[in-house]
């Protein structure tokens, strides 16, 4: 749908701000990020020679991350726009057009994204697979340690099963550290600054919204 002056003012030109992330979602992002960074630090610092009592902080942060992610999934499915983060046909078409354009082929120009572009959606899908694998294996690994709440009982699984659990946990952790580095790099680049700002303040300006998003795919100003 074309954005005309008329339908912008109909949709309420009263505010110059378009809400992008509610407070609950911003809190989730930053608490989740703090947990993931703590988990990566407590996992990898001892390996590169910084010795400290890492295990207590590691498993407790892991349990906190599991609770946060569970709440996020319930919110995303019930209250948020579930399809905003799913790759659809328009994303694939735009990705193909951009690819063709990059290699000098003539044709239709790629359209604008909805709330998230295809690379953000791919990143989210990748993180979801890695973090859910890490959580599932990590919660099982709690059976290997004594805590104030329970005593260790590693005999519920066979050795080769534990082997696989450690392989998945470790590989997912290595994938995660790479993905998080790329994510933070892009978040700190000034050309996408409006997105970073929106993860702190919750909104973007109406002009940024119109310039970078397809209103037919993300009708944020009608909510
Ligand atoms: C199967 C599991 C998951 C589902 C179904 C899911 C779904 C979604 C959806 C639909 C959104 C977009 C909401 C919107 O903007 O309207 C979203 C955003 C987001 N997701 Fe997930 N997600 C899952 C797992 C994860 C995991 C494991 C993480 C990280 C550890 C994660 C981190 C985020 C973040 C940071 C956002 C942006 C903040 C927000 O607007 O909520 N998600 N997710
Ligand atoms: C301190 C470091 C971090 C910064 C500066 C940062 C910044 C951001 C920003 C600005 C967005 C929103 C983009 C938008 O509104 O479209 C975002 C989204 C998201 N963040 Fe982070 N983040 C950080 C750490 C993390 C960590 C550690 C994870 C998880 C492992 C993570 C996972 C996500 C996910 C899954 C999304 C939603 C997908 C996307 O929009 O790309 N973030 N982050």
Image (cartoon, rainbow, N blue to C red):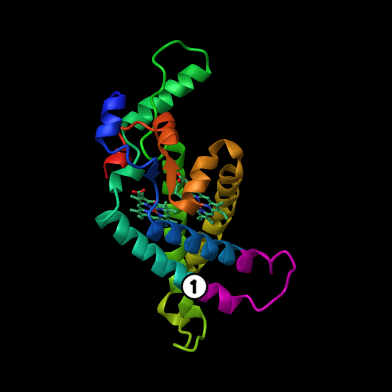
Q: Quadrant of the C terminus?
A: top left
User: Can residue 144 be seen from the camera position used here?
Assistant: yes
Figure check: 67 above or below 123: below
Figure check: 187 above or below 68: above
In screen coordinates, is 189 left or right of 26? Answer: right
Residue name at image x 61 percent, y 67 percent: 43
Residue at which label 1 appears: 159
**Which span of residues is magenta-colored?**
41-61
Mark 1 CB in 8 Å range of ligand 1? Answer: no
Spot occupied by residue 134 in the image (x, y as percentages of width and height): 47, 62
Figure check: 147 above or below 8: below
State how many labels appear. Answer: 1
Nearer to me, 166 or 123: 123
Nearer to me, 103 or 29: 29
Residue name at image x 33 percent, y 43 percent: 84
Spot occupied by residue 140 in the image (x, y as percentages of width and height): 43, 72
In screen coordinates, is 183 left or right of 15? Answer: right
Residue name at image x 48 percent, y 62 percent: 32
Nearer to me, 39 or 84: 84
Residue 139 among those drawn in magenta: no
Spot occupied by residue 185 in the image (x, y as percentages of width and height): 61, 45
List the single residue furthest toward the right. Answer: 49
Bin the neighbour count of mark 1 within 10 Å (Cα to Cα): few under 14, some 14-19, many 20 and up. few
Residue 48 among those drawn in magenta: yes
User: Can residue 216 be seen from the camera position used here?
Assistant: no
Figure check: 214 above or below 190: above
Spot occupied by residue 17 in the image (x, y as percentages of width and height): 40, 43
Q: Quadrant of the N terminus?
A: top left
Q: What SS does tag 1 mark?
A: helix
Q: Quadrant of residue 27?
A: bottom left
List the single residue furthest toward the top. Answer: 106
């Amino acid at each position: 749908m074309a954005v005309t002056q008329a339908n912008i003012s109909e949709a309420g030109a009263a505010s110059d701000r378009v809400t992008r992330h509610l407070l609950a979602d911003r809190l989730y992002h930053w608490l989740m990020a703090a947990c993931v960074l703590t988990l990566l630090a407590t996992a990898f610092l001892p390996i590169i020679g910084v010795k400290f009592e890492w295990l207590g902080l590691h498993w407790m942060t892991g349990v906190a991350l599991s609770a946060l992610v569970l709440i996020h999934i319930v919110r995303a499915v019930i209250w948020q726009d579930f399809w905003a983060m799913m790759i659809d046909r328009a994303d694939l078409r735009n990705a193909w057009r951009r690819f063709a354009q990059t290699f000098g082929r003539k044709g239709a120009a790629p359209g604008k994204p909805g709330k998230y572009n295809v690379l953000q959606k791919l990143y989210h899908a990748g993180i979801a697979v890695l973090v859910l694998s890490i959580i599932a294996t990590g919660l099982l690994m709690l059976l290997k340690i004594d805590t104030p709440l329970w005593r260790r009982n590693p005999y519920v699984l066979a050795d080769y099963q534990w082997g696989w659990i450690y392989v998945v946990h470790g590989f997912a952790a290595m994938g995660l550290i790479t993905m998080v580095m790329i994510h933070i790099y892009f978040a700190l680049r000034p050309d996408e600054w409006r997105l970073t700002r929106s993860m702190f303040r919750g909104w973007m300006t109406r002009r940024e919204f119109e310039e970078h998003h397809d209103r037919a795919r993300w009708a944020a100003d009608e909510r």
